[in-house]
Image (cartoon, rainbow, N blue to C red):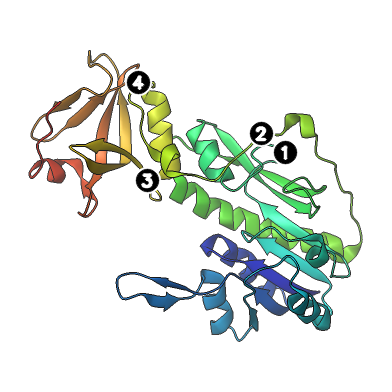
């Protein structure tokens, strides 16, 4: 198959690798534009561009997709069979209709559950014990297209965003490969999504990350899991941001919501129900630490 691969972050790399490994012709990759990062404003590539450059694959980085006639003509000139989209931007119809077999997307949930930008995070934040991956044919409304294949993924109690994300990227790559094989064979049975079962997975904001200690410890624990190691749940103490990376639920401690119990080695904070033992923490402007190390240099006062 002659494929144009569209993606941006690390999550997309296993899918691109498996297509190359199985001798599909990657005509080009499309990714977002380079960014200046860090104090030195050093220009950095997306993970997908970095991989493409290392493997001598042509790269396109359009600033916009809608109404970009130059980009549309560039894609048409490649004469692709298929666009494979993994963690990229929303494609307009004028783009996703270009290939002979159209375009499909790999989405990090068991659609129609968790349509939106942050499906893996919200599965963890909501305390789900299972999530999934879906490949679907692109349609004009985001994440609503007919489904090619799906696979469920178990969420372990000790999973955070990083561990679940990395595992799902590998499962997703296999699903991408199976979907391409299915399309190539012509043996396709698309399944329509049941819109009545849809739920949102909106973009994570700074407000999402702010801990509300009046909520039960179980909810805050899941918030921490869903946002670790990035962008990280936090609270404010003496007008400083304190980030929390890892917690454990503690029962039978009579602490009020937000009340802090500190010893030389332990930090426990009261919640609406139960309390949380803080295991990994970071003060604004400092590095992430184990709580015991952190407490050697920081004193909380309620």
Rendered residue at 8%/34% (across/down): 264
Q: Is residue 225 visible?
A: no
**Extreme residue in the front direction:** 67
Rendered residue at 79%/62% (across/down): 103
Residue 97 in the image: state x and y as whole percent.
85, 64
The 10 Å Cα crowd at callout 1, few under 14, some 14 to 19, many 20 or more, is: many
Is label 2 in contact with label 1 (beta carbons under 8 Å)?
A: yes
Reading the image, the residue beneath label 4 is: 214
Depth order, front residue of 152/244? 244
Label placed on residue 112: 1
Q: Quadrant of the C terminus?
A: top left
Q: Earlier in the sequence, mark 4 or mark 2?
A: 2
User: What is the distance, in whole Å, between disc 2 and disc 3 at their CAs?
Assistant: 23 Å
Reading the image, the residue beneath label 2 is: 199
Reading the image, the residue beneath label 3 is: 232
Mark 4, secondary structure of its residue: loop
């Amino acid at each position: 198959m002659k494929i144009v691969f569209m993606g941006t972050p690390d999550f997309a790399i296993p899918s691109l690798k498996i297509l190359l490994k199985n001798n599909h012709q990657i005509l080009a990759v499309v990714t977002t534009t380079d960014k200046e990062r860090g104090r030195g404003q050093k220009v950095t590539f997306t993970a997908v561009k970095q991989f493409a450059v290392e493997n001598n694959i042509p790269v396109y980085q359009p600033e916009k997709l809608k109404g970009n006639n130059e980009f549309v003509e560039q894609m048409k000139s490649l004469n692709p069979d298929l666009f494979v989209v993994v963690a990229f931007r929303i494609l307009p119809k004028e783009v996703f209709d270009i290939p002979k077999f159209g375009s499909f997307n790999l989405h990090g949930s068991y659609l129609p559950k968790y349509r939106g930008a942050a499906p893996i995070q919200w599965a963890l934040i909501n305390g789900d014990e299972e999530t999934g991956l879906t490949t679907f044919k692109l349609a004009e409304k985001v994440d609503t297209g007919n489904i090619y294949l799906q696979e469920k993924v178990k969420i372990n109690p000790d999973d955070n965003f990083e561990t679940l994300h990395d595992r799902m990227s590998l499962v997703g790559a296999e699903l991408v490969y199976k979907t391409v094989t299915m399309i190539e064979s012509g043996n396709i049975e698309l399944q329509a999504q049941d819109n009545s079962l849809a739920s949102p997975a909106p973009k994570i904001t700074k407000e999402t990350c702010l801990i509300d200690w009046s909520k039960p410890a179980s909810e805050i624990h899941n918030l921490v899991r869903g946002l670790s190691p990035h962008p990280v749940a936090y609270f404010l103490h003496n007008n400083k941001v304190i980030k929390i990376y890892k917690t454990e639920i503690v029962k039978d401690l009579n602490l009020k919501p937000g009340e802090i119990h500190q010893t030389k080695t332990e930090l426990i904070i009261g919640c609406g129900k139960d309390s949380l033992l803080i295991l990994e923490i970071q003060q604004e402007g400092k590095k992430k630490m184990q709580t015991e190390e952190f407490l050697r240099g920081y004193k909380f006062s309620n």
